[in-house]
Amino acid sequence: MPNKIDYTNKYKCRVLVCWVKHKNKFLLLKRSDKVLAYKNMWSSLAGFLDDEKSLEEKVKEELQEEIGISEKNIIKIIPGKTYEMIDEKINRKWITHPVLCEVNTDQVRLDWEHTGYKWVTEGEFDNFEIVPNSLKAFEILVRR
């Protein structure tokens, strides 16, 4: 098994922020109170880039583990431009790799990291308290 980086107490963290799209809707996930940051907020799919897997491999892994969507349901994976975002409230610098992933299913199976989900249009975002880095990734990926 490859070495993993433990980002628990690190200031600078490499992360994947993946917006999952089905038809004209985007998946919002309600973060549980068991996650490291942004407890009980809404976000896109996200995870630490803490091993040597490629970005595409990590997207597939996170889709399967966190929301139960398998590789066969992926239509396409579109990476965006990597950027840095500092969140002074939690003293973190996110080195963010944004990805848009189109899928052919709206069936989701949550793991412990999330307590709920909704498929929404961009116009519905204002109804949710969304993690700032998820919103920034959306800007880069969708509103180019």
Image: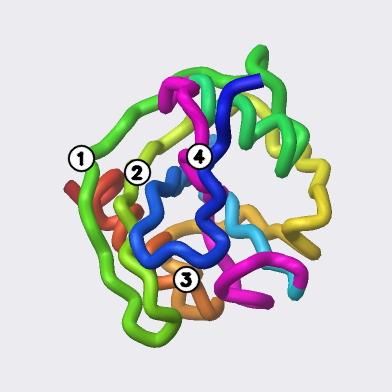
At 71% from the left and 30% from the top, the residue drawn is 64
Residue matched to label 3:
131
Kindly report the distance in space between the C-alpha atoms of the residues bearing marks 2 and 1. Answer: 7 Å
Residue matched to label 2:
98
Residue matched to label 1:
81
Q: Is residue 41 above or below residue 44?
A: below
Quadrant of the snapshot with the N terminus = top right
Colouring: rainbow
Mark nearer the N terminus (3 vs 4): 4
What residue type is disc 3 on? Val
At 70% from the left and 38% from the top, the residue drawn is 106
Kindly report the distance in space between the C-alpha atoms of the residues bearing marks 3 and 2. Answer: 14 Å
User: Are circles 4 and 1 on residues that touch, CB within 8 Å?
Assistant: no
Kindly report the distance in space between the C-alpha atoms of the residues bearing marks 3 and 4. Answer: 20 Å
For mark 4, give the secondary structure: loop
Magenta residues span 34-56
Tell me the tag on residue 45.
none
Q: State left or right for residue 66 relative to residue 21.
A: right
Mark nearer the N terminus (3 vs 2): 2
What residue type is disc 2 on? Pro
Q: Position of residue 142 (x, y in %)?
A: 29, 47
